[in-house]
């Protein structure tokens, strides 16, 4: 797949279609997206979204939002008043808890796991699916997301074909192998497949009846791979989750929870560190290439959209009245660990507030015509807006969490 979308795939903006793409690594990205979506909701834009795409950490937020979408009711200004209750609160609790990926008693007593357990095939990835199901989205199937007025798409990478794999209410599959009806595929499986860190977790094994697939551009030897797909991190294939979005037209909002590769003064050169560092640099350069292309396409008015980046600073958008953390605190946010390690209580408000203020600047700078109302900024965690204490809290966290959500 090309790192840069060809020009003939771009469509003119649709007056009524807003597309949101959520990308970036692990729990840190999920919190950044959460803050950004809070501001999009306050601006009345979230209820206007007609298609959402996610990879990696963005898949967590998309999964929770999709599972709760039927319960969200918009007011006269298009704002979901219960967004925090239905979406934000469960995600913040999820990322603050440790993921124990070893199968426990609850895993062993479930009949659906017995075959894998007896065969020694139950993996940490299967346990991840269970935890996502138990703590976030339940046993909801993708087919339950039909007819909601919005499309949800999770993207993964099939290690067998090297192609991009899609999960949605309408279909599951990829262009090489073709697509099939999702049937019993769950939202938790879609989240896990897109979220997996390939260096740390085994791929999600997705088994299918080959006869259920339709289409597919591969030859006969390729189509035989329909029976088993090995799925992992969607960012390997599409770092910003924009490939499918580009063919839809409309206003494209990219929310990128990834960040730059920071200098490593304490880097020790041995084969393990060298491989990890090389992979990180290569991944960053791939994302940076696509990021620059997307921003340049907006500047040249080839597409309508905006870019909300964790590694951005609110002053980058050129608004005299923008607000947010200083560069000093923003750099500390960029250096927070990615992955599936639990987020400390003192960093949750920090990352969420950052996403909120960057989203405000990005939308007001590039999409002012989309705004019918401009409510004042209300940080999700106003207590965490104090620049004087933020660095101290990150480096030497307090004994107890003293941050409070805005009422």
Image (cartoon, rainbow, N blue to C red):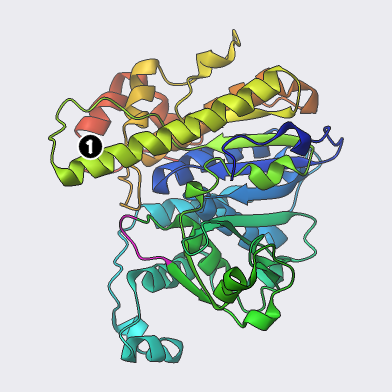
Q: Quadrant of residue 209?
A: bottom right
The number of callouts visible is: 1
Residue 202 forms part of the magenta stretch: yes
Q: Which residues are drawn in magenta?
A: 199-203
| Residue at 76% over, 25% down | 302
What percent of the width, then of the height, locates residue 382?
46, 30
Instruction: Tell me the chief SS of the magenta region.
Output: loop
Crowding at mark 1 (Cα within 10 Å: few <14, some 14-19, many 20+)? some
Give the quarter of the figure containing the C terminus.
Answer: top right
Residue 104 can be seen, yes or no: yes
Q: Nearer the viewer, residue 364 or 128?
A: 128
Q: Nearest the camera: 211 or 218?
A: 218
Residue 168's quadrant in the figure? bottom right
Q: Position of residue 97 (x, y in %)?
A: 33, 57
Q: Is residue 35 magenta?
A: no
Give the residue displayed 78% in from the left and 35% down from the top: 8
């Amino acid at each position: 797949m090309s790192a840069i979308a060809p020009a003939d795939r771009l469509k003119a903006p649709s007056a009524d279609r807003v597309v949101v793409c959520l990308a970036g690594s692990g729990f840190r990205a999920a919190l950044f997206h959460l803050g950004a979506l809070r501001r999009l909701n306050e601006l009345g834009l979230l209820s206007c979204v007609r298609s959402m795409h996610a990879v990696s950490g963005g898949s967590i937020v998309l999964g929770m939002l999709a599972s709760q979408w039927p319960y969200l009711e918009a007011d006269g200004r298009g704002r979901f008043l219960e967004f925090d209750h239905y979406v934000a609160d469960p995600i913040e609790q999820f990322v603050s808890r440790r993921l124990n990926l070893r199968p426990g008693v609850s895993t062993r007593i479930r009949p659906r796991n017995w075959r894998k357990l007896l065969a020694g095939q139950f993996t940490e990835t299967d346990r991840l699916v269970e935890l996502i199901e138990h703590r976030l989205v339940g046993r909801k199937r993708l087919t339950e997301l039909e007819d909601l007025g919005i499309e949800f798409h999770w993207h993964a990478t099939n290690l067998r074909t090297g192609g991009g794999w899609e999960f949605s209410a309408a279909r599951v599959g990829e262009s090489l192998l073709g697509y099939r009806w999702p049937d019993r595929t769950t939202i938790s499986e879609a989240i896990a497949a897109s979220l997996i860190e390939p260096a740390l977790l085994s791929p999600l094994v997705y088994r299918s009846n080959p006869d259920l697939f339709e289409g597919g551009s591969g030859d006969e030897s390729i189509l035989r791979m329909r029976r088993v797909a090995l799925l992992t991190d969607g960012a390997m294939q599409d770092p910003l989750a924009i490939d499918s979005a580009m063919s839809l037209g409309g206003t494209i909002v990219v929310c990128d929870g990834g960040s730059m590769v920071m200098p490593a003064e304490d880097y020790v050169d041995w084969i393990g560190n060298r491989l990890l560092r090389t992979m990180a640099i290569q991944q960053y350069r791939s994302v940076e290439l696509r990021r620059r292309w997307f921003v340049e396409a907006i500047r040249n008015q080839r597409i309508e959209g905006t870019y909300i980046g964790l590694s951005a600073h609110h002053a980058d958008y050129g608004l005299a009245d923008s607000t947010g953390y200083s560069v000093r605190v923003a750099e500390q946010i960029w250096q927070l660990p990615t992955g599936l390690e639990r987020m400390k209580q003192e960093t949750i408000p920090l990352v969420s507030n950052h996403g909120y203020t960057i989203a405000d600047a990005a939308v007001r700078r590039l999409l002012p015509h989309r705004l019918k109302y401009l409510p004042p900024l209300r940080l999700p965690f106003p207590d965490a807006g104090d620049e004087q204490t933020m660095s101290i809290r990150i480096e030497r966290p307090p004994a107890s969490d003293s941050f409070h959500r805005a009422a």
